[in-house]
Image: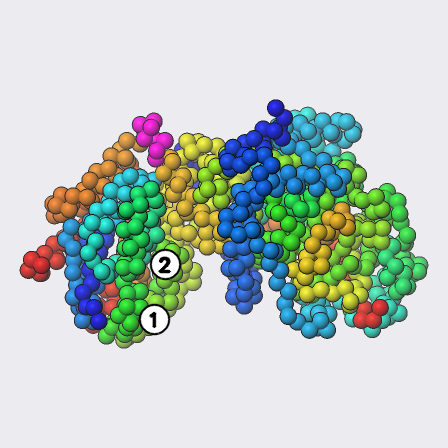
């Protein structure tokens, strides 16, 4: 088995939730992988792309291609960033054949973390332990663009001590949407509150997702409401022992 | 420039097509229509039809032959005033002979008046669709449009042989309904609305009570 | 031009409205799910692909199919009238009504007619146009526009309806829904029987048959198209499909996607005035083919998908933004995701620049669209166009600067690391100070981590 993997940690994890990156590193090393972290990495360009700034997004994407050119396997702790890379880089480089070819060549090498565990590492049980009632939020890009749904649930099912409670309308958007939450904060907040209602109905004290942006959105509104709910990235749960 | 000229000009400019140019096929010709007719024993069509029809709120009767039709619907006609279509099948079933039933209309205005005043409209059907519990009615000298529409109740006498599996089968035997009639209507359940607070109400404009009499032997 | 912030906030803060929207759309979501599940409709995904392919082909060859449609309508005794604008459509109807001495017409539900303010234009010239669909009738009396493509009066309660009827019809205040429906039925029955013209929309225009297809549940469309001596159908040019047999695909998708019904109560396939030997039906049939800007959407292959829409409303029901802000906060008659993509295309991207951004790009709409319109992709394209327009007009400079700055930082790793070590790099990202305040009003702000992952890695590992 090829044990060397590269980690694209994503700008939000790097700056706001480094514990997610640390957790992923721990899990991968526990499974026998050698984690490589290309230090020149920054961002995938999604915020610029989603706001209509294609030129800026292109620059950032070009940098990404350079940084990860020699990486055979790239692991990403985010559905939305993975989707940006594997689906939208091709849109950005539509008119640049060389970079388009690079983007296409990159696609099969990029793995959202949970999918990597299940399909490449081929493990469901990573030896984790986490006590408590946990529910799962399907982040939009992961669900609809990467078709990730049962995978994280399989991984959570194997965590010792964890009681899983499926929430109603798990596939409803949390309301982050990047700059959407800044341009339409009242709608974004209302969407988050609806989501939190669903979470509360499960009795869970922890809500898990594979996207830190969703978790950030939810935690912000949870804290404002003073609720005893904690958000955690799947990697953090899988790293717990 | 006429409106027609301008619109076609704008369309062709946007699509980069020339007048009279045949349609472009990207990969292959437009695929043949995908018609999906379930593999089902035809003898079961009537059972399925009745099940679906009743789940929509219709009331159904199954009768052996044409002479059993009138007894089946007799109670529905008590103290009621009905208009029936000119369908020969209805005549055969003895429906048009009943005293409360007025049939034989050929004048549009007279028909309209009669239907507006009637309690019940009685028709045959051209086809019925088992999968959805639908009547299929083509406007013709035998079947006027308003009989199944204006009165608050509608009784359809359905010959079992006219049952088809579903809409796809209908379209396979009738690929161009416009060749035969100005109006083909599929009736799937009683008239209804949920426009106010999503609460279901039957009989808004069309008939709120519908009945199907499925006749095994014609 | 700007988002109706106050109205949006009001909609969100109205618990009764929120409950009404959520329950109504929730019901439609569940009904649809029941009938498109793998058990109920095993070919659902195939049907979607087929529908997309047929629409794509038709739109790409629209002139060909419109010509075919026209010649078949004429062959069956009808007439086709091309209308560049809503005014041309209204003028035709007014002219015909005058010629035939018609003072009142009945109308069945047609979003296209709402789009062109059809009723208002007629009423300006004393031609009474009576809405006959229950929801639309109530709205007509209340002088409101539809809240939803398929459930127009979704936002009203029975008490609202009672008040409208009392005020406009002079009847006693009646709050029982069944009785309200009876009131409407009785008033409208008279209208159907007396009207000189019946106007309908069309869900589909069948090119090989010269026919229109109208689907409904109440029976008012059948009545409007069968009782009056003249039938006028108004339809956008994009409604064309090639063959009657293509209905096997579209009719198996439309009802299911809209209301969870395998077929709506009435599906009418109408081609022209009554045939010679038919007893009833109209004597005259006119098909008004409306452009009103649709040709503007044809040029771009991605945005052109917007014309595939069959107006089922599923995207509205599943849209978390629609479900919060409601139909009246969209600037045009078409609301929800479909409204968000066609409004800027019809009115110009600079008319309501906020609209393409009023989405979290969750993709729920695209997932349920029966004709597989890539709505998020079109939204992204429109965002790019808005941004480009702003660049040209030199507005929104602060936001542009922020993204340019971020792009520069993100392509210069040493700078990125330096800034990171000084604090968070996120704050230069925020477009303006104002929005950050509003963003903060909804939530407790996240804090930049004391040590970034980069720093943790560097500290933990020897240079590798």
In this view, the residue in front, B198 or B128, is B128
Q: Secondary structure at mark 1?
A: helix
Q: What is the distance, in whole Å, between disc 2 and disc 1 at their CAs? A: 16 Å
Name above or below for residue C287 compared with residue C33.
Answer: above
Q: Which quarter of the rendering shows the N terminus of chain B?
A: top right
For disc 2, the marked residue is: A146
- Residue situated in front as seen by the camera: B143 or C319: B143
Pointers 2 and 1 in contact (CB under 8 A)? Answer: no
Q: Residue at x 89, y 49 (%)?
A: B105
Residue A21 drawn at (x, y percent): 20, 59
Q: Is residue A120 visible?
A: yes
Residue C85, percent from left and from top: 59, 30
- Residue B110, quarter of picture: top right
Residue topped by disc 1: A154
Q: In the image shown, does C107 or C154 lie closer to the viewer?
A: C107
**Magenta stretch secondary structure, dominant:** helix
Residue name at image x 53 percent, y 36 percent: B17
**Res. C199 visible in picture:** no
Q: Chain of mark 1?
A: A
> Looking at the picture, how far across and down is residue C424, in whole percent?
18, 46
As drawn, which residue projects farthest toward the left? C462
Mark 2 burial class by Cα count in 10 Å: few <14, some 14-19, many 20+: some
At which x and y percent is residue B152?
Answer: 78, 54
Q: What count of labels does the image hold?
A: 2
**Is B57 placed left or right of A167 in the picture?**
right
Residue located 33% across and 66% down the image: A152
- Tell me: residue C137, above or below residue A20: above
Depth check, mark 2 against mark 1: the one in front is 2
Task: Say whether mark 1 and mark 2 are on the same chain.
Answer: yes
Q: Which residues are magenta?
A: C387-394
Q: Based on the displayed image, in which of its 4 quarters is residue A127 positioned?
A: bottom left
Q: Is residue A217 magenta?
A: no
């Amino acid at each position: 088995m090829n044990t060397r993997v590269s980690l694209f940690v994503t700008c939000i994890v790097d700056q706001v939730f480094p514990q997610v990156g640390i957790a992923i590193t721990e899990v991968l090393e526990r499974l026998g992988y050698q984690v490589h972290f290309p230090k020149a990495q920054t961002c995938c360009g999604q915020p610029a792309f989603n706001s209509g700034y294609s030129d800026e997004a292109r620059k950032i994407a070009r940098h990404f291609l350079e940084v990860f050119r020699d990486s055979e396997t790239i692991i990403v702790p985010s559905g939305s960033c993975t989707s940006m890379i594997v689906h939208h880089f091709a849109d950005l480089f539509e008119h640049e054949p060389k970079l388009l070819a690079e983007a296409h060549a990159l696609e099969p090498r990029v793995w959202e973390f949970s999918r990597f565990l299940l399909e490449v590492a081929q493990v469901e049980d990573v030896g984790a332990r986490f006590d408590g009632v946990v529910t799962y939020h399907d982040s939009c890009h992961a669900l609809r663009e990467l078709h990730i749904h049962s995978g994280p649930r399989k991984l959570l099912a194997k965590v010792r001590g964890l009681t899983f409670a499926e929430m109603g309308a798990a596939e409803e958007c949390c309301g982050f949407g990047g700059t959407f939450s800044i341009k339409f904060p009242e709608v974004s907040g209302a969407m988050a509150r609806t989501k939190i209602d669903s979470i509360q109905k499960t009795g869970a004290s922890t809500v898990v997702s594979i996207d830190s942006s969703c978790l950030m959105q939810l935690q912000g509104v949870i804290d404002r409401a003073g609720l005893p709910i904690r958000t955690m990235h799947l990697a953090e749960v899988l790293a717990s022992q | 420039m006429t409106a027609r000229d301008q619109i076609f000009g704008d369309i062709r400019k946007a699509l980069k097509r020339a007048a009279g140019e045949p349609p472009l096929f990207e990969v292959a010709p437009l695929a043949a229509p995908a018609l999906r007719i379930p593999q089902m024993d035809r003898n079961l069509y009537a059972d399925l039809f009745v099940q679906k029809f009743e789940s929509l709120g219709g009331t159904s009767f199954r009768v052996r032959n044409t002479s059993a039709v009138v007894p089946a619907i007799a109670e529905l006609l008590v103290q009621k005033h009905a208009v029936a279509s000119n369908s020969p099948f209805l005549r055969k079933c003895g429906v048009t002979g009943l005293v409360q039933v007025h049939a034989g209309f050929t004048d549009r205005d007279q028909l309209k008046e009669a239907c507006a005043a009637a309690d019940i409209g009685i028709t045959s059907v051209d086809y019925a669709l088992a999968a959805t519990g639908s009547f299929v009615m083509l406007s013709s000298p035998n079947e006027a449009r308003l009989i199944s529409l204006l009165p608050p109740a509608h009784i359809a006498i359905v010959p079992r042989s006219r049952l088809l599996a579903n809409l796809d089968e209908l379209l396979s035997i009738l690929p161009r309904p416009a060749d035969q009639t100005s109006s083909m209507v599929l009736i799937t359940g009683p008239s209804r609305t949920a426009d106010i607070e999503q609460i279901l109400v039957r009989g808004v404009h069309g008939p709120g009570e519908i009945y199907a009499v499925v006749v095994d032997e014609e | 031009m700007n988002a109706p912030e106050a109205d949006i906030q009001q909609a969100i803060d109205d618990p009764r409205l929120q409950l009404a929207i959520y329950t109504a759309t929730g019901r439609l979501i569940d009904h649809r799910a029941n009938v498109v599940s793998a058990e109920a409709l095993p070919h659902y995904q195939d049907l979607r692909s087929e529908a997309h392919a047929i629409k794509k082909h038709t739109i790409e060859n629209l002139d060909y199919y419109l010509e075919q449609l026209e010649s078949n309508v004429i062959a069956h005794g009808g007439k086709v009238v091309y209308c560049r604008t809503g005014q041309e459509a209204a003028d035709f109807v007014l002219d015909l009504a005058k010629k035939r001495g018609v003072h009142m017409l009945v109308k069945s539900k047609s979003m296209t007619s709402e789009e062109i303010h059809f009723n208002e234009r007629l009423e300006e010239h004393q031609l009474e146009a009576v809405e006959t669909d229950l929801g639309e009738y109530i709205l007509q009396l209340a002088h409101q526009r539809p809240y939803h493509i398929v459930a127009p009066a979704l936002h009203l309660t029975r008490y609202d309806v009672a008040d409208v009827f009392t005020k406009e019809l002079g009847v006693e205040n009646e709050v029982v829904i069944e009785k309200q429906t009876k009131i409407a039925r009785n008033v409208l029955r008279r209208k159907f029987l007396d009207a000189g013209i019946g106007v309908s929309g069309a869900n589909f225009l069948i090119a090989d048959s010269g026919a229109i297809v109208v689907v409904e549940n109440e029976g008012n469309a059948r009545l409007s198209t069968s009782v009056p001596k003249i039938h006028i159908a108004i339809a956008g040019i994009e409604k064309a499909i090639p063959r009657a047999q293509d209905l096997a695909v579209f009719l198996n998708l439309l009802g299911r996607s809209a209301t969870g019904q395998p077929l709506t109560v009435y599906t009418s396939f109408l081609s022209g005035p009554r045939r010679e030997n038919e007893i009833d039906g109209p004597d005259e049939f006119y098909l008004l083919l409306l452009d009103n800007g649709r040709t503007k959407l044809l040029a771009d292959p991605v945005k052109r998908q917007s014309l595939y829409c069959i107006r089922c409303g599923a995207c509205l029901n599943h849209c978390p933004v629609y479900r919060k802000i409601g139909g009246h906060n969209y600037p045009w008659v078409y609301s929800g995701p479909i409204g968000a993509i066609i409004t800027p295309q019809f009115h110009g991207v600079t008319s309501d620049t906020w609209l393409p951004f009023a989405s979290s790009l969750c993709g729920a709409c695209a997932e349920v669209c029966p004709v597989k319109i890539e709505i998020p992709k079109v939204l992204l394209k429109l965002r790019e166009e808005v941004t480009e327009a702003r660049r040209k007009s030199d507005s929104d400079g602060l936001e542009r600067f922020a993204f340019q700055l971020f792009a520069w930082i993100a392509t210069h790793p040493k700078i990125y690391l330096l800034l990171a070590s000084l604090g968070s790099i996120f704050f230069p990202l925020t477009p303006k100070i104002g929005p950050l305040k509003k963003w903060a009003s909804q939530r407790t702000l996240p804090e930049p981590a004391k040590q970034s992952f980069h720093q943790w890695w560097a500290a933990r590992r020897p240079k590798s």
